Amino acid sequence: MSERPMIRKQRQNRMARSAGRPNGFTLIELMVAMLLGLVVIGGVTSVFLAGQQTYRTNEALSDVEQGSRTAFELLARDIRDAGNTGCDTSSGRVANVVNPPDPWYADWNDALVGYDDATTDPALAGITGNGAPVAKTSSVHVLSTANSDVTISQVPSKDSASFEINAATTQLTTGELIMICDFDHATILQITNYNGATNVVHDSGNNATPGNCSKGLGYPTICTGPATGNAYLFPPNSRVAVLTAEVWYIGTNPLNGQSLYRLDATSGAGGVTATPQEMVRNVTNMQIAYLQPPGATFSTASNVTNWAVVDAAQVTLTLLSTSQRVGATSSAPLQRSFTSTTTVRTRVQ
């Protein structure tokens, strides 16, 4: 018998048996396939969640780092310029005819002064609601002068209550606190009348608030006796600059959180006003230490005995991220503290 018919018959038998069995997966095969699918889906989900968490964390880190850079840049700019007159006043010869007792915004003796608890800072007294100081956080006062293109062109006489400037300007107004300086000394005073021309009046009396105790601009200041006080003739080209005064502190923001605030004193015909301005949000703490020569270590404000020689400030800020969920299971924002040291430009030799 030939082998070929036998092989054909065996093939037909196998085909017949296959035709009698249903096609598809068995239950066990289906369960194995589903299990493998779940493992793959779980792995993809895990990678996705890990990437999402990493993104949130990096975003929160970027948020607090950007906030700290902005805060330190603004703070450092003011601290560096504390006590800056624009003239060489390293001798300390600064007269002040603004009516005593000198308000904080005109007290050049405290061109840089700090408080360990902002709620005890007299400049912040009475501020409630938005901008109210936060207890146990530091505050710092900074007085300086703003650059201007104004100089003295002529003074009629040394006991005069006015002077001429080089040109009419919009940088000066009635009630403005200004500083005039030359090679000899600087003097802080208040403009009692300026009509936008070239004549600037700085008379004594009640023509402005707080006003001048004397029209004499000499050093040292004399507020008693005649209205001329200690007369002095500032020569032509003496610098005239607007006095600036700020307080940096941590205050309560409109969202009942904390922010870095600046209290900026603005003088005008109606007197001097100081309004809190929110500068950087989510800054929850500020601690400042000061370097007082000849010491070599930073100390808190309560340990400073002579603010006139403090030549550096070390500021530590604590910030929170805007995102309220940084971790996979945590609902709290990211918190970081940063420290920066700034020297006072006019006091560093």
Image: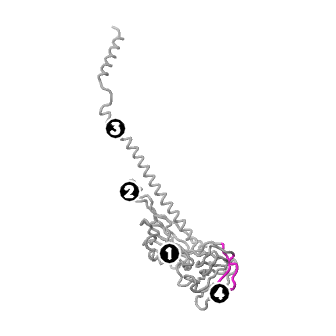
Q: Nearer the viewer, mark 4 or mark 2?
A: 4
**What secondary structure is marked by label 4?**
loop
**Which quadrant of the figure contains the N terminus?**
top left
Q: Which residues are magenta?
A: 149-166
Q: Quadrant of residue 255?
A: bottom left
Residue 275 point in image, percent of width and height:
50, 73
Q: Which mark is residue 231?
A: 4
Residue linked to disc 1: 114
**What secondary structure is marked by label 1?**
strand
Residue 98 point in image, percent of width and height:
57, 83
Q: Which mark is residue 330?
A: 2
The three-letter amino acid code for the residue at tag 3 is Met
Near mark 4 (Cα within 10 A), the count class, few <14, some 14-19 or many ≥20, is many
Which of the two labelled residues, at mark 3 and mark 4, occupies the earlier sequence position? 3
Near mark 2 (Cα within 10 A), the count class, few <14, some 14-19 or many ≥20, is few
Q: Which mark is residue 207?
A: none
Question: Is residue 164 toward the left or the right of residue 262 in the image?
Answer: right
